[in-house]
């Protein structure tokens, strides 16, 4: 692999070995073509009554609605849906936080499937390297073309106004065929490593699930006590804030549920409150509204929002054991709710839930065992995150021609 980096456009100039074509700075050996030179539209309707309704997932690509949602969100009459064969592509005009310009995915998991007629479906022309363009679309390289033509639909909120003719007349960067092949091979090797790391994480999760089930749900444990959570720990609500009390800067960060699960925007406060309205590193907390679950807080001192409890275990309960028990119980809570989803749980209801626990010494041993499994998963997740970052960096370098490869 040889490296050639361009400095971009400066007073109409590009770096040696590169050219400016249709707004793209690309190597001189590359060209820009129209989308319809590489792909053609698919319009075959579902005349064979295929029932495998597909949806686009950011992480899983084109996946069966039954596999993804465990239910179907489709009309009873599916004859108007488009039929896809394995290897075909579909563009979903719906935008989201992960895909601001919609998403293009290739059908890889099934031999056939059907998609909503709102999707733009297409297949490769002869000689088009679909492995290369799958990576190209996933890297968001086509987004600038969607941006040129897309406006939010006036009638269909959440959909981008991208007409089929505009889509197929959009520009595609086209490297030499052999270079496309080599770029795809390099990125697919990254995909294999990422898939292997994810498989290891999933396996560790299955192992922990089995261990946790044996520990917390088994009736074989003699001498274990069973008591309501309200008798073995104290749940303390955070503070409810008025909008004008949430500042852009201030003495204390205000921890909200969104900061725990989506890393949303932080607010601050200068208020001096009672000590139980703060959490510090090492405290056990529990989000109970919209998103659910316990955490051992590892950050600095913060004020916490009303939708979070600080949990104070009583003397006979180990904090780390209670944390692990809460993680087990979250799954039970979800199953108890209609449809398996939750919006919130009251403190009164939480205090009435029964907890099983052994002696304090055994609690600590169990917590240490499960913590070791968690640490292994965290290490694997860190390795996965690193590989995903490496792949993103490679995509930006290889798919733009900043870094060249020798076929």
Image: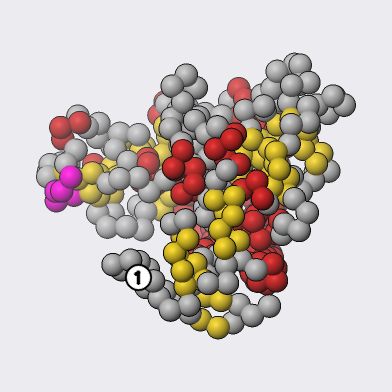
Front-lying residue, 126 or 380: 126
The verdict on residue 328 being magenta is: no
Residue 389 visible to an observer of this rendering: no
Picture layout, residue 278 above or below residue 45: below
| Residue at the image position 32 percent from the left and 41 percent from the top | 256
State the image coordinates of residue 382 (x, y, percent, origin top left). Answer: 52, 65
State the image coordinates of residue 126 (x, y, percent, origin top left). Answer: 78, 54
State the image coordinates of residue 213 (x, y, percent, origin top left). Answer: 67, 47
Front-lying residue, 262 or 321: 262
| Residue at the image position 71 percent from the left and 34 percent from the top | 54
Residue 300 visible to an observer of this rendering: yes
| Residue at the image position 33 percent from the left and 66 percent from the top | 12
The verdict on residue 251 being magenta is: yes
Predominant SS along the magenta part:
loop
Which residue bears the numbered disc 1? 13
Front-lying residue, 296 or 365: 296
Q: Residues within 10 Å of mark 1 (few under 14, many from 20)?
A: few
């Amino acid at each position: 692999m040889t490296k050639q980096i361009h400095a971009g456009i400066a007073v109409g100039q590009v770096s040696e070995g590169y050219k400016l074509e249709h707004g793209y700075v690309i190597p001189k050996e590359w060209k820009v073509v129209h989308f319809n030179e590489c792909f053609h539209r698919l319009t075959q309707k579902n005349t064979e009554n295929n029932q495998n309704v597909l949806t686009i997932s950011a992480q899983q690509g084109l996946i069966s609605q039954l596999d993804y949602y465990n239910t179907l969100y489709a009309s009873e009459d599916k004859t108007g849906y488009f039929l896809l064969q394995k290897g075909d592509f579909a563009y979903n005009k719906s935008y989201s936080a992960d895909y601001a310009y919609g998403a293009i995915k290739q059908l890889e998991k099934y031999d056939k499937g059907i998609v909503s007629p709102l999707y733009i479906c297409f297949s490769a022309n002869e000689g088009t390297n679909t492995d290369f363009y799958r990576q190209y679309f996933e890297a968001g390289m086509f987004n600038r073309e969607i941006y040129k033509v897309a406006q939010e639909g006036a009638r269909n909120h959440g959909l981008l106004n991208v007409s089929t003719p505009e889509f197929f007349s959009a520009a595609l960067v086209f490297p030499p065929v052999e270079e496309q092949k080599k770029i795809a091979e390099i990125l697919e090797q990254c995909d294999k490593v990422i898939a292997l790391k994810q498989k290891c994480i999933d396996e560790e999760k299955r192992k922990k699930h089995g261990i946790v089930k044996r520990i917390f749900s088994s009736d074989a444990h003699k001498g274990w006590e069973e008591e309501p959570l309200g008798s073995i720990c104290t749940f303390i609500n955070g503070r409810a804030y008025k909008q004008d009390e949430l500042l852009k800067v201030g003495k204390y960060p205000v921890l909200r549920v969104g900061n725990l699960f989506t890393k949303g925007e932080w607010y601050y406060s200068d208020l001096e409150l009672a000590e139980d309205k703060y959490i510090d590193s090492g405290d056990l907390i529990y989000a109970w509204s919209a998103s659910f679950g316990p955490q051992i807080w590892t950050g600095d001192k913060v004020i916490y929002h009303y939708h979070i409890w600080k949990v104070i275990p009583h003397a006979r309960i180990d904090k780390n054991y209670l944390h692990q028990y809460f993680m087990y119980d979250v799954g039970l809570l979800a199953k108890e709710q209609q449809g398996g989803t939750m919006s919130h749980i009251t403190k009164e209801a939480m205090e009435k839930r029964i907890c099983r626990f052994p002696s304090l010494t055994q609690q600590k041993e169990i917590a240490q065992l499960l913590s070791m499994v968690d640490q292994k998963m965290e290490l694997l997740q860190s390795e996965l995150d690193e590989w995903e970052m490496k792949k993103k960096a490679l995509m930006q370098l290889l798919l733009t021609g900043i870094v060249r490869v020798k076929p």
